[in-house]
Image: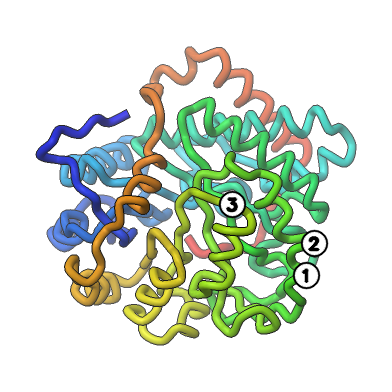
Amino acid sequence: MIILNKTQQRAPGPIMLDVIGTTLSADDIRRIKHPLTCGVILFTRNFQDRAQLTALTTAIRAERPDILIAVDHEGGRVQRFRTDGFTRLPAMRVLGALWDTDVLAATKAATAVGFVLAAELRASGIDLSFTPVLDLDYGGSTVIGDRAFHRDPRVVTLLAKSLSHGLRLAGMANCGKHFPGHGFVEGDSHLSIPLDQRTLQQIMDEDIKPYDWLGMSLSAVMPAHVIYPKVDKHSAGFSKKWLTILRKEIGFNGVIFSDDLSMDAASSAGSVLDGARAALAAGCDVVMICNSPDKADQLLEGLSAAQTPASDASASRRAALMPQGLALDWNALPKNGDYLVARELITSLVTSLVPARTDAFPQ
């Protein structure tokens, strides 16, 4: 865990952005050092090999010791780093299928996945993975699909809890997504604005249950870029109504991330600056902008520190996402008994149960 001295302590935020390539450019450094930047999210394009990745995270940390470095690294289709020693992780549906045949084996495997995922990322200088997916597997979603554990919210809850336990064993927080639920709609919010025509009661009875049951074990939540017109005209990440339900009715006290403001579904709020303002006004602690340096600059310039002060509550919530305890060095992982057992379990599961994937996911 990084301890900041008094000259380094501040309340950054609320913008999480990305970097262009495998090393930091001058523009990357300028954005990272901006007082409104609180985090960096990495993608496959930022990865060449482990040595390069570790050098990149070290360089980011050198510019901002207090910054949160994150990645979408779930397993299955959504695993940003797959080579040079990173363990191939199964899609979450594989764990759900295992649950249907052996509950105890599935919970053990979910814990192993969380532990290996977090241990390998932390050994590479990464603080947080946006996982677990808490969406229900209704069978028709093109973007969620096998990223979901199961159709049954009880199974989703228990497998997510086991995976989160594994994350915690390696010192990493978690982030449940995509609130209140993205699994029912067929559209891909990267490409369109999905509409979920169900009533509030229908959603509360099923999709929201994992958030309610997991309670205080969730460190962060990411809302869906989905509009639920029978509840609110705004998509969940821009909806004060939805985020009030999350805070007040469910009692969630962690960090709320907006999903990527560059996604097509975010256009429902207007410009990227309009979207950021709407997300913050609705109750998000962090707004995310990816794959668009120009839009990142628009946010940094448009959301001045004077207009967007970092609240003490938001700053405290974000600080709680930083890893706990020292990370294992990568070279120490093969000597760690827990890691070896967990990795062997995962490798056996992937070899026996995971079919070859041909579909793609934005990297």
Q: Is residue 324 visible?
A: yes
Give the image location of residue 64, x and y in percent: 19, 45
Q: Is 173 on the left or on the right of 177, as rendered?
A: left
- The residue shown at (49%, 85%) is 268
Direction left: furthest residue: 7
- The residue shown at (24%, 72%) is 303
* Mark 1 Cα-neighbour bin, 10 Å: few <14, some 14–19, many ≥20: few
- Give how far apart the Cα atoms at labels 3 and 2 are: 17 Å
- The residue shown at (58%, 58%) is 248
Amino acid identity at mark 3 = Gly
Asked if the residue under mark 3 is in contact with the one under mark 1, i.e. CB atoms within 8 Å, the reply is no
Q: Which residue is mark 2?
A: 205
Front residue of this view, candidates 289 and 123: 289
Give the image location of residue 336, x and y in percent: 50, 14
Indicate the quadrant containing the N terminus: top left, top right, bottom left or bottom right.
top left
Along the polypeptide, which appears first: circle 3 or circle 2? 2
Q: Quadrant of residue 206?
A: bottom right
- Give how far apart the Cα atoms at labels 1 and 3 are: 18 Å
Q: Is 135 on the left or on the right of 302, as rendered?
A: right
- Give how far apart the Cα atoms at labels 1 and 2 are: 6 Å
The image shows residue 343, relative to residue 245, as above or below, that is above
- The residue shown at (65%, 52%) is 211
Disc 2 on helix, strand or loop? helix
Q: Which residue is mark 3?
A: 251
Q: Which residue is mark 1?
A: 201
Label tally: 3
Amino acid identity at mark 2 = Asp
Disc 1 on helix, strand or loop? helix
